Image (spheres, coloured by chain):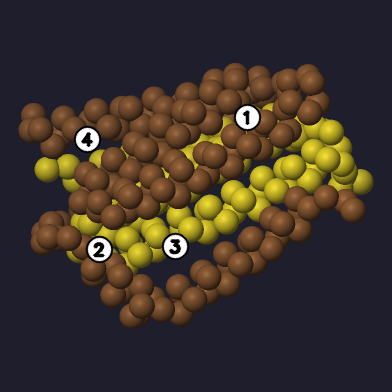
Amino acid sequence: MTLATLGFGVVAALLLATSLAVVLTPNLFHSVLYLAAALVLTGVVFLLLEQPFLFAVQLLLYAGGVVTIVVFAIMLTEQLVGERVGQASRYPINGAIVAAAVFAGIVGFLIQAPVRATAPAPAGDTTAAIGRALVGPFAVTLELLGVLLVAALLGALYFARSEE
Amino acid sequence: MIGLQAYLVLAALVFAIGLFGVLTRRNAVGILLGIELMLNAVNINLVAFARFNGDLGGVVFTLFTISITVAEVAVGLAIVIAIFRVRRTVEADRLDLLRG
């Protein structure tokens, strides 16, 4: 077993364990902490796929931004009401059956798909090439993303504003 | 060398786990966490295809999906907080205002 295989196995096992913890732990706050770990591990998967820039974006936006927002939302919705919302799973067996069926469907599709030749590893840093692609063939998409972010910002402000 | 298939199976597993969370969580914030896991699985797929096909388009699209997900979480949690103000609960089973 090579070092790369071992590394992938360890990261994959940790990612699956933290993902399971996210959906199974009864305490919602612990769930968010496990989600942060799972997001960082996803970033490590990006590192294994030789995309260090995406690893940095993942840490900044997800582990930094999303987890902070979710923690704030939990503090706002749990402490005001005094009683803790029931966290126990509902219909866990039905949910497991549906999730397993979806997984079996995806894997069944993967088995049928032909195995394609693997491209060689990208030479050097790909960050500059990503930047050129963003302002080249994907320029319109980038501008639309800016519009979407403004719309999301205004929408979030609208929903969260006070009544007065 | 780890093949493309291993990454795709890993992503499929994370996606299924996230789907389980969406289906079984009672709390609306918990459902959002499950959606986060599912979107992460998609990102793994995109980056794996980009790496093994030697095409940077997948990486650029991962950047887009990450940004869109962050916007989605911000709006989703704002909706959850707005619902909490009106109904004093974020339990998904009790948010049945639109049921006839």
Chain drawn in yellow: B
What separation in Å lies between label 4 and label 3 (alpha carbons)? 25 Å
- Picture disc at residue A8: 4
Q: Residue at x 61, y 67 (%)?
A: A150
Check the residue under mark 3 and report the chain it is in.
Answer: B
Disc 4 versus disc 2: nearer the observer: 2
Q: Nearer the viewer, residue A28 or B24?
A: A28
Q: Regarding mark 2 in the picture, which secondary structure is present there?
A: helix
The residue wearing badge 2 is: A127
Say which quarter of the image contains residue B54: bottom left
Instruction: Give the colour of chain A.
Output: brown
Labels 4 and 1 share a subunit: no
Q: Is residue B32 left or right of residue A124?
A: right
Is A142 drawn above or below residue B37 in the view shown? below
Asked whether residue B31 is in view, the answer is no
Rendered-image quadrant of the N terminus of chain B? top left
Q: Amino acid at mark 2?
A: Thr
What separation in Å lies between label 4 and label 1 (alpha carbons)? 29 Å
For the residue carrying disc 2, how many other residues have a C-alpha within 10 Å: few (<14), some (14-19), or many (20+)?
few
